[in-house]
Every structure is written in C-alpha cells, then in structure tokens.
Image (cartoon, grey):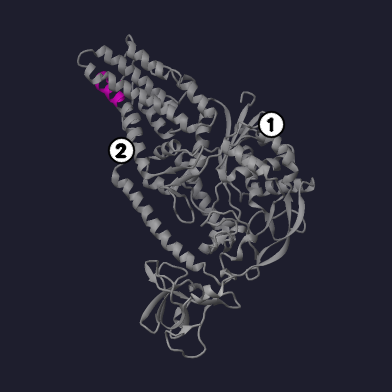
Amino acid sequence: MNNFKRTLVTTALPYANGPVHIGHLAGVYVPADIYVRYLRLRGRDVLFIGGSDEHGVPVTIRARKEGITTQQVVDRYHELIKSSFERFGISFDIYSRTTSAIHHQFASDYFRKLYEDGKFIEQTTEQFYDPETGHFLTDRNIKGECPRCHAAGAYGDQCEKCGSTLSPDELINPYNAETGNPLQKRPTSHWYLPLDQYQQWLEKWILEEHKEWRPNVYGQCKSWLDGGLRPRAVTRDLDWGIPVPVEGADGKVLYVWFDAPIGYISNTKELCDARPEQFGNWETWWKDSSTRLIHFIGKDNIVFHCIVFPSMLKADGSYILPDNVPSNEFLNLEGDKISTSRNWAVWLNEYLDDFPGKQDVLRYVLTANAPETKDNDFTWADFQARNNNELVAIYGNFVNRALVLTQKYFEGKVPARGELNDYDRATIEEFKNVKTQLEELLENFRFRDAQKEAMNLARIGNKYLADTEPWKLAKTDIARTGTVLNLSLQIAANLATAFEPFLPFSSAKLREMLCMDAANWDTLGSLNLLTEGHALGTVSLLFEKLEDSVIQGQLDRLARIKKENEEKAKEEELKNWHPAAIKTDTTIDEFDKIDIRVATVLDCQPVKKSERLLQFTLDDGVGQRTILSGIAQSYPDPSVLVGKQVLFIANFPPRKMMGIESNGMILSAVNADGKLVVTTVSKDVKNGVQVG
C-alpha cells in the first residue's frame, strides 16, 4: 500500500432495469463507501467511480414488458438509482451511465484498438433463433425441460427448481421464454476474446501474486483456471447496445460484459475531462503504476473482474490491473434468496421513503451482517433489535446522557478535568488503540469487524457513565462529576470520528451537537478533542427506538408478496405447460393413466390481475367444473370459446391459482402461427365421454 500514491475505487454497475435493493448495498456499495470515506479521512488521494449498466437483455425485457422504449426504461431507473444512492449517502465522485456519448465512443474505440491489434478471433457457431420474432436469443431468454430434474420452464442458464447450471443446448425441447415459440439453430459469426491465451499469465498473476485476496475470490478464480479457459464472445446479435464498429457487423453490438467494465474507464474520463483542476488526467488514474485499483463487487461478478476484465486490460497493454477485488457473498431476506423478479427484496428507494432520516440504521445493520465470508441473512427482527439494543441503548444513550448532564450541571460547557483515578485510567487504556485497530481492519477490508470496534468504543463510554453515576456524584462532588463528564465528552467526540466512515449522517449530527469541526482521523484516540469551556450545541436524540408496529408493517408487506409469489408460481407452472415441453419418451402405461374427457364450455372469462389465465366453466357431464388455463394471450376475446366442446384432463389434482381452485387441465395445441389453440371435437359428443 505504501508504494501507491492514489487509489481508484470502482463499484459494480447495477442494471438499470429496476431499483437497488439491500443485497446490492450489503454486497457492494456500503463497503465501498466505508472504504472511500476512510481513505478521505486519512487524507489519501482517492477517486470513487460508479454508474448504471444500461445495455444487455434485462433492460430490453423490461421495456417489452411495460410496452415502452428501452431508452425510457434506462432513463427512469438510472435516475431512480442515482437519486437513491445520493439520498443514502453513497459518496461517488461520479455516477454516470453506459448510454452516455462518452462511453459509447470510448467503448467503440477500445474494441477497435483490440480488433486492429489482432487480439480477437472470429468464429461462426450455431445459436438458438426464433424465426417468428427474427431474433437470436440469449441463454436467459430460452426455456425448456430441465435435463436433470425434468422440471418445466428451466432457463437456458439455470434450472431454478434444482439449481443446476445449464446451457441452452442441454434443455429438452427449448422454446422462447417470452413468446413460447419453438426455436431453430442458425449459424452466426462473432468476435471472441481468446481467454485461453491468457491462462498462463492469469495463473501467475492471481494464484502466485495475489494470495492475499479473499478466499471466495481466490477460490473461484482457481476453479475457473483449473477448468481451463476458453474463448469468450465479445459481441452479440441484439438491437440494443453499442454497435460493433467494424465492417460486416450489422445487427451486432458489444456484449454487455465487455462494454460494462469499460464504463469504469469512460466514467473516469468523463469526470476528469469536466474537472481537471480537481481530479487531473484520467490516464493518471488508469495507466500510472502508482495508482491502486480496487473493484468492489458481488460474488456473481468475480470471474468478470478477476479474469475477463484483466485480460481485456492486458490485451491493450497500457492499463494497470486491479490490486484487490474484495467481493462479498450474497445477502438473503428473511431466510429466502433476494429476487428482483419475485419482488422479494427491500428496495432502497422504498426504505428511504418508509424510514426518513434513518439511512445510518440500515447502513449499520447491513455492515453488522455483511456477507464478507459467507451468505448472510437480513431480518426485520434483527434490524429492530440492532437499532433498539445497540444504536439507541448503547451509542445513543451514552451520547445523550453525557451531553444532557453537561447541560444540567455545567451550563452546556465542557467542564474541567481533574485528577484521574484508577478506573478513569483503566477506561482510557481500553480505547487507546482504537485508531490502530480500526486502521488495521479497514485497510484489510474487514468492515464488519471495524464497525464492531467502533461500537466497542461506545460500549466503553456507556459502561463508564453507568459505573461512575455522575448524576449521583453531582450531589456530593461536582469537581469529580466534571472529570467524569469531560472524559465522557472526549469519548463522544472520538465516536464522531470513528463512526464517520460507517454512519456519516449521525456522525455529522453528533459533531453538530458537540460543535466540532470536520472529523480529523489523525486525532482519533485523543483525550483533548474538546477544550475546557468549549460550548456544546443543542442536544437531540442521535437515534430513535423502532416500535413493533413499524416492523410489523414491513413483515406484513413481505407476507403479501410471498402469497402473491406462490400464486404466480402456480400460474407460471401452468404457463410453462407447453406442447414444446411435453416429454417425448412417455410410455403407453404412463399415457393410459391420463383421464381425458369431453366437456362443453359454459363460460370463459379472463382472471383478474392475470395476463395469462382464463377461467373456464365446463359442463363435464356430471356437473360444472372450473379449470384455469394459461392461454389468455391466444384468446383476446375468450367468449368465442363458449359453447364449444373441448378436451380436458380430468384426473389432475385440484390446485389453487390467483385464489381460484382449478380442477383439471384444458388440452391445447400450437397452431401454425405459434399460438395455443384449445382442442375440440369435430361433432357433438356426450359431455363426460372419456377419450382413449
């Protein structure tokens, strides 16, 4: 560290297809902000770079879902994410975006240079294509039957039921996840970064020269390298992204994993070009060996930041490489994996609205539960307990009592410090190394332990006040009371600095109450931060207790979401029943178990709040039967089905979807236009007749 003159800190670019949630905060942005604030307190030269990732498939899916343009999607979420970070106190020097003109030009130039230097190879491969929509599909846009557990609706990169990592080629009967259309294989040409050519260099650089990296980072890199690296495509067949800047590349864009990390560089250039007097030249930050580059990321981005992006930088040859990549594991929510698609998350913008002025409470809890070495869990019960039992009862209680007693007995001015007794000296001994300990932990990215050390200082102060009982001393020994409160106020002043990287809002509030200047790290541990006679400001509560009703409101919200997800999962399972996904190896015995019968449609209505479900009321020959079917998109006017005789499976067990019990399954087939059509009979048949 001593050989570096400056530190460049980057954070993973969040997709601009939705808000930021607590998993993102705990994994990337809170630890990065703690580190940057610490470096600034130390007087280090540091640059903090962030931005939105606005290309790739997720944003296009969101746009199609909402019926708006992709640009409208990224504009909306970029502004929401940026403002949420600002309100939460993530202190970026710049938060830009990958749709900026500067980034488009920079990324194009970067590709072009590597292309002209012969760093890419061109390959033609067969990929899945939807002839109906005219698009090649990404792995996540493809569904089919899982080859491992045979669940319907597995994605082309993973089966969410059994957790298996997949490729689209492994899926049984793959189809377009959005349209349900069957797929074809077609040849397409792309440019690839030959990672295998960097294998030997990466093994030396990572496995030999960076053994200090966190075990999860080092271990994942070793696993990839042990498995042997292969060329990776840097272009895709998409209509959204940065066009590939070479001839013969019509309809192709830079792959998002290639484009996004270049955003770190283009954002730095954007900042430095706008404010050169403050930040200098961007190349100093990216090409000077005396700059230390640190990437803060989640574990799902390790391979891109430790293997792929360094290979891109190495291919150019003029850039520095990351010195450390302190990646965190995942944060779960109430024992379940955070999921954007299932709305199972605590969204930052909603938290800021629901808990105004309590940014530091969330920062504290996320740091206390930071998934630094393993996945961890966020619960609202723990959130409340840490606020009430630690921030309020220890830190806040200590500060409030020290200041209120000073107001009461010494007119709000720092009293004189008399002779210290053994207990005073023992207390001072306990926190004399706080600066050294915090520096050791923060320099090594151990933010959870560092915050615990800062809170330990508050515990020392709280215990000191409780043991010395200055409210009692004041009745008999006002001089001794002054000494106790002087030491207590010195500890409080130290807390304002110690907590500055972690809890910037409350630290600023505490400095205001103490009438202190800006935090000075060099004076941390001093007992002379406040001079005798120094006037204190207005005292107010540093933290407030959270009532049960507030927490219950959040739990009730999650309960509603969980119920909605269960109903959607059932609907999704029905939707994923698709002729393209039917097993082709069903035996005669298995088929004979299916009870297919004839019924007349008495009524057919769309299910409220469902885009795909129709509710059939059937005359099945015995009585009336209700069946839900996920074919609404094929029948915008479901009344055309009334009076028709259809085939249905009668012996499927009942299941509830969207609050309605469905008893069976309507049989459908794929028409020539790709739409699902209910199967009917050619002439009148008695209702209830079995088809065999």
In the image shown, does 99 or 503 lie closer to the viewer?
Answer: 503
| Magenta residue span | 401-412
Q: Position of residue 260 (x, y in %)?
A: 62, 47
Q: In what quadrant of the picture does the N terminus appear?
A: top right
Q: CA distance from mark 1 to mark 2?
A: 49 Å
Q: Residue furthest left?
A: 475
Q: Which residue is mark 1?
A: 288
Residue at image location 50% in from the left, 86% down from the top: 681
Instruction: Count the numbered circles shown.
Output: 2
What label does residue 545 carry, if any?
2
Q: Position of residue 676 (x, y in %)?
A: 54, 75
Residue at image location 74% in from the left, 53% down from the top: 191
Helix, strand or loop under label 1: loop
Q: Is residue 183 above or below residue 421?
A: below
Q: Nearer the viewer, mark 1 or mark 2?
A: 2
Sequence order check: which comes first, mark 1 or mark 2?
Answer: 1
Q: Is residue 172 above or below residue 266?
A: below
Is 410 inside the magenta-drawn segment?
yes
Q: Position of residue 240 (x, y in %)?
A: 63, 58
In the image shown, does 183 or 237 lie closer to the viewer?
Answer: 183
* Quarter location, residue 579: bottom right
Residue at image location 37% in from the left, 69% down from the top: 660
In the image shown, does 305 or 526 lie closer to the viewer?
Answer: 305
Three-letter code for the amino acid on which mark 1 is drawn: Asp
Q: Position of residue 138 (x, y in %)?
A: 62, 59
Q: Is residue 418 above or below residue 274?
A: above
- Regarding residue 663, the answer to whether it shows in the image is yes
What label does residue 477 carry, if any?
none
Helix, strand or loop under label 2: loop
Three-letter code for the amino acid on which mark 2 is drawn: Lys
